[in-house]
Amino acid sequence: MKALMTAALLCAGVFLQGCYSPMSSLERDLAKGFSDDADIKFVGHESVQREEADSYGNEKYLILDFRNNTPFIDDSQLQANISQICKTVFGNQDLIKNLSDEGYDMISVSFESTSQYDCL
């Protein structure tokens, strides 16, 4: 009985160790790049792999999801926030290297998961 319990605990430990995944360097760079701003907060990211490449060859892209605590007054305010986020991404050489190493072709910004805006 003791041997059975020991084997069960050992198997559980091995299983749980496989479930633990430390934060990847991409996740660390994303977390560092976007602080908890009063108005716009970075809430996560999603990787999208396309089945077929389009004419530009975009096959894998990263969607950066943000929440806005106050509604945008107009489109120019929305565009200014998108531009600032994209500049933050492009200005972080470690992040750009990680994205390139992981095969990303494109980055998009999303607010409230309703609309996506590409960083060009």
Image: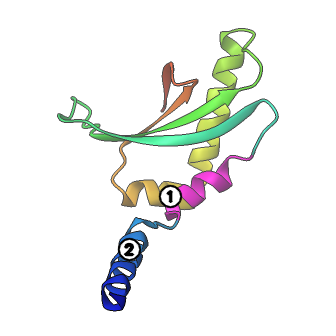
Position of residue 91 relative to residue 114, above or below, is: below
- The residue range painted magenta reads 23-35
Residue type for callout 2: Ala
Q: CA distance from mark 1 to mark 2?
A: 29 Å
**Farthest residue, direction front:** 1
Decide whether residue 111 is among the magenta residues. Answer: no
Above or below — where is 81 with respect to 4?
A: above
Tell me what residue is drawn at x 50 percent, y 19 percent.
115
Above-or-below relation of 120 to 16: above
Q: Position of residue 71 (x, y in %)?
A: 73, 15
Main SS, magenta region, reads helix
Q: Which residue is mark 1?
A: 26
Residue 26 falls inside the magenta stretch: yes
**Which residue is found at the position 56% from the left and 34% from the top?**
65
Q: Is there any visible trace of residue 103 in the rendered image?
A: yes
Residue position for label 2: 12
Horizontal relation, residue 112 to residue 51: left or right: right
Judge from the rendering whether residue 55 lies leftward or rightward of residue 3; answer left or right. Answer: left
